[in-house]
């Protein structure tokens, strides 16, 4: 249930805030009052681990030179902003303030040139941290029959010239078979796999 809510929150946060009212957006993303109630219920479980999750998240980000440069000396400020954002989401639901903040964050991402592929991948990382690695554990050993080169070819099929340019710099590692977890760097794959993942709730039940 929590995974499903996260998945749909991605859809809400990426959509435009100027052409549709909040109720319509929640309905389109299939977020119900019960889902919002679930968020409030699990927040006391997640909150104590939030500092640790964010520390892991930023260690992960600093492993990517481009993202590390974007962050610069703003890590502390960004962590505080993210704590506030997540607390508001879990405790207040998708309020008008949430939509305003999501729109402002989206504008900032656009202004600094942060591409959607990076913050979608960030959802993948944070989701797995929140559920203590259970997403990765369930997807990392499931083959897809594809490779990173295969996906590059597929995603550039309307621009063959771009593929040949990229093909010249793609190394042998991109020809290695990848798993469902590896494919989660793609938003459509992440959203497709999340509904099949089962995680343990605090009582040890799979949900």
Image (cartoon, rainbow, N blue to C red):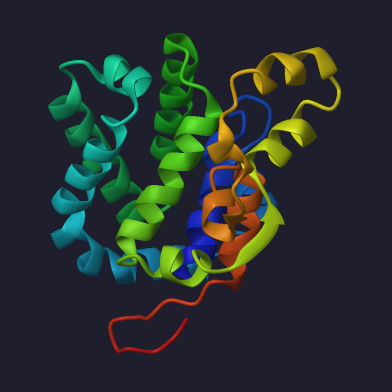
Coordinates of residue 163 in the picture (x, y in percent): 75, 21
Q: Which residue is pictured at 21% across the width and 67% down the height? A: 44
Residue 125's place in the image compared with 170, above or below, is below
Callout count? 0
Is 98 left, or right, of 5 in this rendering? left
Residue 6's place in the image compared with 139, above or below, is above
Q: Which residue is pictured at 22% across the width and 46% down the height? A: 56
Q: Which residue is pictured at 54% across the width and 64% down the height? A: 4
Coordinates of residue 25 in the picture (x, y in percent): 63, 44
Coordinates of residue 40 in the picture (x, y in percent): 33, 65
Q: Which residue is pictured at 37% across the width and 81% down the height? A: 200
Q: Is residue 95 visible?
A: no
Is 168 left, or right, of 117 in this rendering? right
Coordinates of residue 176 in the picture (x, y in percent): 59, 48
Q: Nearer the viewer, residue 42 or 19?
A: 42
Q: Residue furthest front?
A: 172
Residue 63 falls in image quadrant: top left
Residue 201's place in the image compared with 138, above or below, is below
């Amino acid at each position: 249930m929590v995974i499903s809510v996260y998945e749909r929150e991605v859809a809400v946060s990426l959509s435009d805030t100027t052409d549709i009212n909040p109720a319509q957006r929640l309905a389109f993303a299939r977020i119900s009052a019960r889902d919002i109630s679930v968020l409030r219920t699990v927040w006391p479980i997640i909150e104590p681990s939030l500092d640790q999750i964010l520390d892991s998240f930023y260690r992960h980000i600093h492993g990517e030179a481009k993202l590390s440069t974007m962050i610069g000396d703003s890590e502390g400020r960004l962590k505080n902003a993210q704590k506030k954002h997540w607390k508001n989401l879990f405790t207040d639901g998708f309020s008008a303030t949430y939509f305003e903040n999501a729109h402002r964050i989206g504008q900032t991402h656009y202004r600094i040139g942060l591409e959607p592929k990076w913050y979608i991948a960030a959802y993948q990382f944070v989701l797995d941290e929140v559920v203590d690695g259970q997403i990765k554990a369930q997807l990392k050993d499931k083959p897809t029959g594809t490779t990173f080169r295969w996906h590059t070819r597929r995603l550039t099929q309307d621009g063959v010239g771009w593929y040949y340019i990229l093909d010249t710099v793609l190394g042998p590692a991109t020809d290695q078979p990848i798993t469902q977890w590896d494919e989660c760097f793609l938003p459509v794959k992440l959203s497709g796999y999340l509904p099949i993942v089962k995680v343990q709730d605090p009582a040890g039940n799979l949900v």
